Amino acid sequence: MKIFVTAIVGLLLATPALAQRVTMPTPVTTVLRTGTPIVLRFLEGISTKEKVARINDRVRMEVAEAVVINNVTIIPAGSPAVGELTDVRYKGMWGKSGRIVGRVLNVNANGRTIRLSGMFDSKGGSGTVGAIAVSAIVFAPAGFFMTGKSAEMPAGTTVRGFIDEDVPLTYTPQSTSAQPAPMVIQ
């Protein structure tokens, strides 16, 4: 019985020391602010060649550079994102060049879809100068056959978007030796 009492007294005296070593850091709440820039990369190319691109087509993207706040990665690189084509013009006669215009829509991070804003565009080179020169020198119908160039945005092209809503965040700071705790987007 004496050994049992000694063991219990020893545990009671050691408990405060154990509690100090086991205390968990306090969770931190912050906000990912509207207007925070985010760099995105196209996963597939877009082109007006062969008239494949269409208005309202969805464009698959990914985050090219992680979004970091207070040394905590909020949106990891590689997170999926989506854009949408808003205007497509194909190359045409008289040197008219192709054009692609689109907007970024959203990104998915840690199970949450975050609204984005921002535009992207590409314009093919113009053949207008050549068309005008040929039609002026030779005869007017020749410019009719001169076309501009198609617009292209190859896979890997980066564009900038912006966070379009305030996003509340909660994370637990960790010491540099500990594995980072998962960040929660509310």
Image: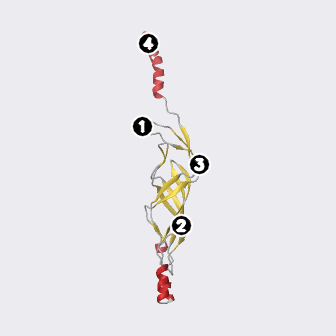
Residue 52 higher or lower than 108, as above or below = below
Q: Could you tell me which residue is drawn at 50 percent across and 56 percent down?
A: 81
Give the amino acid at mark 1: Thr
Q: Earlier in the sequence, mark 3 or mark 1?
A: 3
Q: Earlier in the sequence, mark 3 or mark 2?
A: 2
Q: Which residue is mark 1?
A: 176
**In front: label 3 or label 4:** 3
Instruction: Please provide percent x and percent y for residue 183.
Output: 50, 42
Q: Earlier in the sequence, mark 1 or mark 2?
A: 2
Q: Earlier in the sequence, mark 1 or mark 4?
A: 4
Q: Which residue is mark 2?
A: 101
Instruction: Please provide percent x and percent y for residue 160.
Output: 50, 58
Marks 4 and 2, how far apart in space? 78 Å
Instruction: Please provide percent x and percent y for residue 140.
Output: 51, 88
Q: In this figure, what is the number of numbered marks? A: 4
Q: Which residue is mark 4?
A: 6
Q: Earlier in the sequence, mark 3 or mark 4?
A: 4
Marks 3 and 1, how far apart in space? 28 Å
Give the amino acid at mark 3: Asp
Q: Could you tell me which residue is drawn at 56 percent across and 42 percent down?
A: 30
Using a 10 Å C-alpha cutoff, classify the residue at mark 4 as few (fewer than 14 neighbours), some (14 to 19) or many (20 or more).
few
Q: Which residue is mark 3?
A: 166
Element type where label 2 sits in the image: strand
